[in-house]
Amino acid sequence: MAFTLYSLLQAALLCVNAIAVLHEERFLKNIGWGTDQGIGGFGEEPGIKSQLMNLIRSVRTVMRVPLIIVNSIVIVLLLLFG
Amino acid sequence: MHPTGLAAAGSSGTTRQRKWPAKRRIPVGSQPGMADPHQLFDDTSSAQSRAYGTPRAPSGLGYPAASASPQAAFLADPVSNMAMAYGSSLAAQGKELVDKNMDRFFSVSKLKYYFAVDTMYVGRKLGLLVFPYLHQDWEVQYQQDTPVAPRFDINAPDLYIPAMAFITYVLVAGLALGTQDRFSPDLLGLQASSALAWLTLEVLVILLSLYLVTINTDLTTIDLVAFLGYKYVGMIGGVLMGLLFGKIGYYLVLGWCCLSIFVFMIRTLRLKILAEAAAEGVPVRGARNQLRMYLTMAVAAAQPLLMYWLTFHLVR
């Protein structure tokens, strides 16, 4: 069972990359997950779908620049050390 | 419970008896140094204490190591005295820097709360972990808006038992592999890393689902880590019984511990995740409380599964 912390980090990086490449206009709007389509009223508690959309939007905004750096580092390290 | 103790509950950091547990890998000889940090560098009477004190310097400088030789004649040299003073001041600065930056990431005083335990608490908590069926009152007692230290309330989560149980689990796994001639030192690291990775994954998944279902709880991340770390106790019991009595013993004890952890988690998380009204048995709003109930059940059901998954390959 080779489930190590390192593979967890790799999986997390891949997942964050996957969230970051979801394009707003070409994809999310077409399946109804755009950020301007779901913000509900104030009184009602946000449902799971709007929480997910918020999460995707936040991840894309916050992680854009750090992902560039981390991805470059990981690519260089994987090329050097396999 | 202990009225005299409650007065001191707020300042759990004042008692210096329970410092960091032994797993923190501080060399034993420097324990007296921790109680009085000045003694590390000002005591020139015995070369022994200095030889123990120098590995304690937080920033790996060459100066303290170079000048700390057990020979007293060398230490009387004024140049080495200056080097010692310089090294000690650098070490003090480094320690200040580390302390200042540590506070930015996670507060050490909050962490101290989770290690404020004593032997009686540990004993009773371990008993509760394997037999939670008769315990009636699961509420954590509060004292002026802060939860009471674990020393005074058996329901409070602590990090001492999970940390110790994790280390013991890694050692017991090494023992089990050794009895089957499958041992090699890197396997220990692999076991530890694997268990830590599962724990991290559990914490992340639970935090994510708590966020998605918008549950407002006072369940902090460290609390969650503490609760999820309690299953190592059952795992250790199962593997040890498996070593002694073979597969039958392993399945019996593991089954019992799985059931106990299941009940323990449900009873503990019910008070944290479910709304107060639902905790007393009265459903408030069907759909949302149903989701919370499902989440609690899912978290509790994941514990036995992980307990089995992390130990079945150790018992043949």
Image (tube, coloured by chain):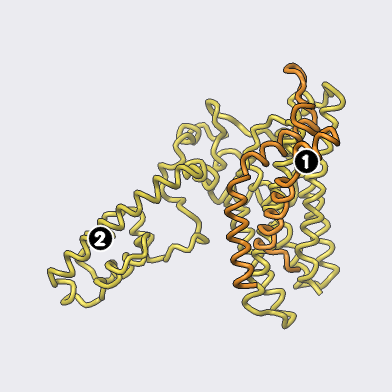
Chain colours: A orange, B yellow
Circle 1: is it few (<14), some (14-19), or many (20+) Cα within 10 Å? many
Figure check: B43 above or below B313: above
Q: Is residue B144 visible?
A: yes
Q: In whole angstroms, how far apart are the C-alphas of marks 1 and 2?
A: 51 Å
Which residue sits at x=74%, y=16%?
A43
> Image point 85% across, 35% down: which residue?
A30
**Residue pointed to by mark 1:** B266
- On residue B178, the disc is none
Say which of marks 1 and 2 sits in front. 2
In the rendered structure, the answer to whether residue B161 lies left or right of residue B57 reads: right
Subunit under mark 1: B
The N terminus of chain B lies in which quarter of the figure?
top right
Number of numbered labels in the structure image:
2
Pinpoint residue B173: horizontal percent, then vertical percent.
69, 70
Chain bearing mark 2:
B
Secondary-structure class at tag 2: helix
Residue farthest along the left direction in this orientation: B78
Q: Quadrant of residue B79?
A: bottom left
In the rendered structure, which amino acid carries the disc numbered 1?
A: Ile
Farthest top residue in view: A43
Disc 1 and disc 2 in contact, CB within 8 angstroms:
no
Indicate the position of residue B159 as horizontal and vertical percent values: 59, 49
Q: Is residue B270 above or below residue B239?
A: above
Q: Amino acid at mark 2?
A: Phe
Query: Toward which corner of the image does residue B172 lie, by quadrant?
Result: bottom right
Q: Are marks 1 and 2 on the same chain?
A: yes
Farthest residue to the front: give it: A26
Dot 1 or dot 2, earlier in sequence = 2
- Image mark for residue B41: 2
Q: Regarding mark 1 in the picture, which secondary structure is present there?
A: helix
